[in-house]
Image: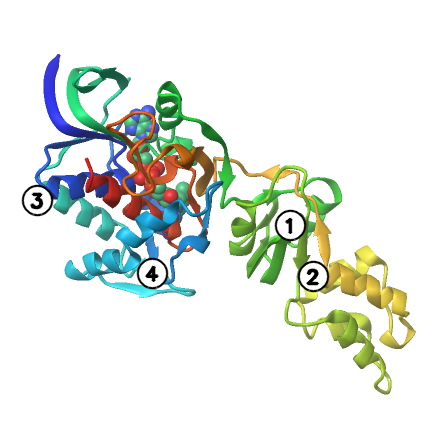
Amino acid sequence: MLNLSYDAVIIGAGAAGSMCAITAAKRGRKVMLIDHSKKFGEKIRISGGGKCNFTNAHCGPDNFISTNPRFCISALNQYTQKDFIDLIESQNIPYHEKKLGQLFCDRSAKDILALLKDLASKYKVHISLAENNIEVQKVESGFKIATADKKIMCQALVIASGGLSIPKIGATRFGYEIAQSFNHEIIKPRPGLVPLTFENDLLAHCKHLSGLSLCAEVTFEKTSFREGLLFTHRGLSGPVILQISSYWRDGGSLIIDLLPKHNVKNFLKKKRNVQNPQNIQTILSDILPKRLVQQICVETNISGSLANISNIEIQKLSDRINHWQVGPTGTEGYRTAEVTVGGVNTRELSSKTMESNLQPGLYFVGEVVDVTGHLGGHNFQWAWSSGWVAGQNI
Ligand SMILES: Cc1cc2nc3c(=O)[nH]c(=O)nc-3n(C[C@H](O)[C@H](O)[C@H](O)COP(=O)(O)OP(=O)(O)OC[C@H]3O[C@@H](n4cnc5c(N)ncnc54)[C@H](O)[C@@H]3O)c2cc1C
């Protein structure tokens, strides 16, 4: 059994934990970064389709979901996307904007991993992977961390163990359990940025159109997103569905506008006024994918020349296209979710330092906290910002 002593121990060698460790070590703190996984930063490696969407040029508090929406402001202001971009540029890592301010590595997410590893090594962060059965105990002088073969004393303890998504690469409930053992409340976690699933007729509809994508606007209650929608053999996916999934609640319905730039009712009425109007399917196929039009016409049982189509039928088509109401039966779950919505209640943390208000010396950073970003690099920015802030204070 090894007996060790550090100023700070950080549990979770992902984006938030490594940023926190590097920041503290750069300030001269003696820091240990531990993880149960055999590999460092696995989620970074698989992120952004292997190219890591490492931040978003337009990142701001409105891009986050939390039961305490203002909590993220301080950390995002203390360490901004510009700070992370400067870090990337200082290491000559080539990157590009894909769309909507989303910044990706030109080459590979491995560039970000290499950057973090190099900095950790430069500032002498002690990284210890494959640490199993980690136990935490509060003692008078700080915290005692026990692993299978080590006993580590530290004054500050940072929990950076992430959320529940992708269990097969190491996600666990560890962070929530530690938080609860110190009397923190957990806002009930649920999968976010995840495809939605359907049953019965809707599932058959999605299966039939599997592979088809188009730009759509999707609304749940007061929240709307307009981006790409993809029909799959399990239901609906694509960026617009991933975005709304973080807001969707069991039993709720979505309103989908499959043609957000057109008012189908006005369009069809105008077309009906011309001489010898064409077949409805031909007309709609000018503005929507043909496969989708065929499916909608079969479902609504509307066919033939537009000249013979009534106002009621036009309304029916318009509702089906501009105001399609669908009730998902669920999500694909943590197996494919990019994030976990919910987590450690931020009302019990300091927004300036990420320290627990209930237990001095204990910090929570990254996805384990009830702050969840929209798709597009915002989750990594939260990991960098919250990790950096804690790293300045431990
Ligand atoms: C497929 C996929 C793609 C993504 N792409 C993007 C993207 O391009 N841009 C973006 O902004 N976000 C993306 N995300 C989200 C982003 O990866 C996370 O929000 C971010 O990694 C969270 O950082 P974190 O450090 O808080 O947690 P994590 O990166 O999850 O790190 C937590 C660490 O804690 C360790 N750990 C867990 N339990 C224990 C335990 N019991 N004991 C010890 N260690 C433990 C884990 O092994 C892990 O190394 C993606 C997520 C997924 C799943």
Q: Amino acid at mark 1?
A: Glu
Mark closer to the chain start, 2 or 3:
3
Disc 1 from disc 4: Cα separation? 30 Å
Q: At numbered mark 4, what does the secondary structure look like: helix, strand or loop?
A: strand
Image x and y of residue 203, in percent: 69, 44
Mark closer to the chain start, 2 or 1:
1
Disc 2 from disc 3: Cα separation? 56 Å
Residue pictured at 32% horizontal, 32% vertical = 161
Q: Nearer the viewer, residue 110 or 378?
A: 378
> How crowded is the residue under tag 2: few (<14 C-alpha within 10 Å), some, or many (20+)?
many
Residue pictured at 46% horizontal, 42% vertical = 68
Q: Nearer the viewer, residue 12 or 30?
A: 30
Ligand 1 quarter of the rendering: top left
Image x and y of residue 205, in percent: 71, 50
Q: Amino acid at mark 2?
A: Leu
Point out which mark residue 103 bears.
4
Q: Amino acid at mark 3?
A: Lys
Q: Nearer the viewer, mark 2 or mark 1?
A: 1
Residue pictured at 84% horizontal, 68% vertical = 314
Is residue 215 depicted above or below 245 in this figure? below
Disc 2 from disc 1: Cα separation? 26 Å
Image x and y of residue 166, in percent: 42, 35
